[in-house]
Amino acid sequence: MSKSPCVYIGEALAAYGFGAGHPFGPDRLDAFWQHACEHGLDQRVRLCTPVAASRDELARFHTDDYIDRVILQSETAEGYLDGGDTPAVAGIYDAARVVVGSVLDAIERILEGECPRAFVPIAGLHHARRDSAAGFCVFNDCGVAIETLRSRHGVQRIAYVDIDAHHGDGVFYSYEGDPGLIFADLHEDGRFLYPGTGNEAETGRGAATGTKLNIPMPPEADDERFLAAWQRVEAFIDARRPEFILLQCGADSIAGDPITDLRYSPAAHRHATQRLLVLAERHAQGRLLAMGGGGYNRGNLARAWTAVLEALISD
C-alpha cells in the first residue's frame, strides 16, 4: 500500500459553487491547491481525478423526488433548492454529482488498500437532507458515504467527526436514531449561528441515545477552548471503536471567516486530523476520509486544508 494520501483535484470538482462572488464560489479549490503546491505537497500525494456519482448512488441517501427536482432546476436555473439559501444555478446537478462521486471513489481506494487515507476538498456538504438542499449543500455526500460503506462494504460502526463552524444537521438528524453512526460535532452554538441546532442535550434517540456528541462552542472560541473540547471528542470516538472514520474539516471555524464567529487557527485542524489518524490506526486499519466542508475566507481555507493534508501525509 502506498503511504501517500489520495487527493481529488480537478475542474469538475472545483465547479461546485454558486457563481463568482458567492461565499461558496468555484474559486475555493484553486485557493487551497495553490497554497498546498507552494508548500510542495503536490509532490507528496497521489492526485486523483474527480468522478461523478450515478443517480443510483445518489439514491442511496436521497429521495427520487428530490433528485428529480435537482435535475429539473439545474436545467432551468430558476429558484432555490431550499427555502432561500441554495440557488438552483445552471449545471448544479452535475457539479454536485462530482462531489459525491469523488467521495465514493475515495472510499473504494481506501478499502481496496490503494491508499490509506484521502482528502476531497470540495465535499462535506453536511446540511442537505434526504429530500431537500440546505445551506449551500445540494447532495449530502457524507450521508451517501455512510450508506455506501454499509450497503456495499458491510462497514457498520462508522465515526463521523465534524469541526465545521456550522452544526452538521443533515447528518445528525438523518442518523439521530441510528446507534451504528458514531457522531461527534464541535460547532458554534446554534443560538448564534445557522442552522440553530446541535444542543448538547441532543445525544441521539431510542437505541442510539448516547452515540451522538454535540459540543456547542461560544462565539470567539479559540484554540485553547478547541483543544479542551477535543479531548471529549477523542475519548468519545476511542471508546466506540469505529471501523471507518469520516472527518468534515470545515475551515469556517478559523478566525476571520466572514459568516461565522469562531477563532481557531489551522493548528486546530492539524491536531484534529493527527489525533483521528491515531484512532484510525488503533481501530479502523488506518481508514480515514477527510472532506473539506465550509470556509469562506479563501486564505483561511487554504491554510486550514493544507494543515489537514500535511497531517494526512505524515506518518
Image (tube, helix red, strand yellow):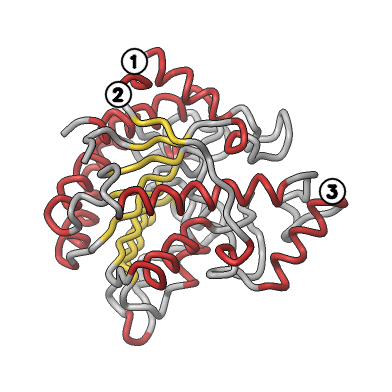
Distance (Cα) linking label 2 and label 3: 40 Å
Q: Are marks 1 and 2 in contact (CB under 8 Å)?
A: yes
Q: Is residue 79 above or below residue 21?
A: below
Mark number displayed over residue 40 = 1
Please give the name of the residue rendered at 20% of the width and 54% of the height, measured from the top-left corner: 234
Helix, strand or loop for disc 1: loop
Closer to the observer: label 2 or label 3?
Answer: 2
**Residue 217 appears in view:** no
Please give the name of the residue rendered at 40% of the width and 32% of the height, measured from the top-left corner: 305
Closer to the observer: label 1 or label 2?
Answer: 2
Helix, strand or loop for disc 3: loop
Mark number displayed over residue 304 = none
Q: Of label 3 and label 1, which has the lower sequence position?
A: 1
Q: Are marks 2 and 3 in contact (CB under 8 Å)?
A: no
**Residue 87 appears in view:** yes
Q: Amino acid at mark 2?
A: Arg
Q: Which residue is tagged 3?
A: 77
Q: Amino acid at mark 1?
A: Gly
Distance (Cα) linking label 1 and label 2: 7 Å
Mark 2 is surrounded, within 10 Å at the Cα level, by few (under 14), some (14 to 19) or many (20 or more) other residues, namely: some
Q: Which residue is tagged 2?
A: 44
Residue 39 in the image: x percent, y percent?
35, 15
Nearer the observer, 183 or 38: 38
